Amino acid sequence: MVEEAERAKEVLEQVHIRVVNINDVVIQKLRQDVPGQLGLFCRRLANAGVNILTQYSDHANQLIVVVDDYEKAKQVSVAWMQEWW
């Protein structure tokens, strides 16, 4: 994950590493004190018709999600933050 994706692509291609795709990601904070947060958030994405392509956690306990519909996922994320934080 990088802030300047196009610049990173240029640098990688200079050393013959082909970049296939650049995606925006949803960075979501989950409540660590509430069991089932990951499942609940993923269900919300599914209910909005959003498929998760990849997900992982960073070192700050944030969920990083690559999805097939970034705009819908962003709406789900904003609503989640209003409800849980």
Image: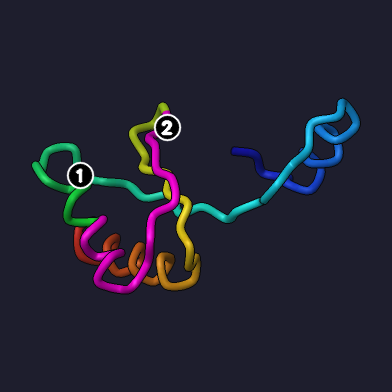
- Mark 1 — residue? 31
Amino acid under disc 2:
Asp
Question: Which residue is at the far left?
Answer: 35
Between residue 78 and residue 46, name the one nearer to us. Answer: 46
Q: Position of residue 78 (x, y in %)?
A: 36, 66
Q: Position of residue 29 (x, y in %)?
A: 32, 47
The magenta stretch spans residue 53:
yes
The quadrant of the rendering that contains the N terminus is top right
Q: Residues within 10 Å of mark 2 (few under 14, many from 20)?
A: few
Q: Is residue 81 left or right of residue 65?
A: left
Q: Quadrant of residue 75?
A: bottom left
Secondary element under disc 1, as helix, strand or loop, is: loop
Q: Is residue 6 above or below residue 69?
A: above
Q: Is residue 85 left or right of residue 54?
A: left
The quadrant of the rendering that contains the C terminus is bottom left
Secondary element under disc 2, as helix, strand or loop, is: loop
- Mark 2 — residue? 58
**Among the two numbered marks 1 and 2 on one chain, the one whose residue lies closer to the N terminus:** 1
Which residue appears at 22% of the width and 47% of the height? Answer: 38
Between residue 33 and residue 64, name the one nearer to us. Answer: 64
Q: Is residue 63 left or right of residue 84?
A: right
Q: Position of residue 19 (x, y in %)?
A: 74, 42
Range covered by the magenta-colored residues:
42-58
Which residue appears at 42% of the width and 32% of the height? Answer: 58
Amino acid under disc 1:
Arg
Q: Quadrant of residue 16?
A: top right
The magenta stretch spans residue 61:
no
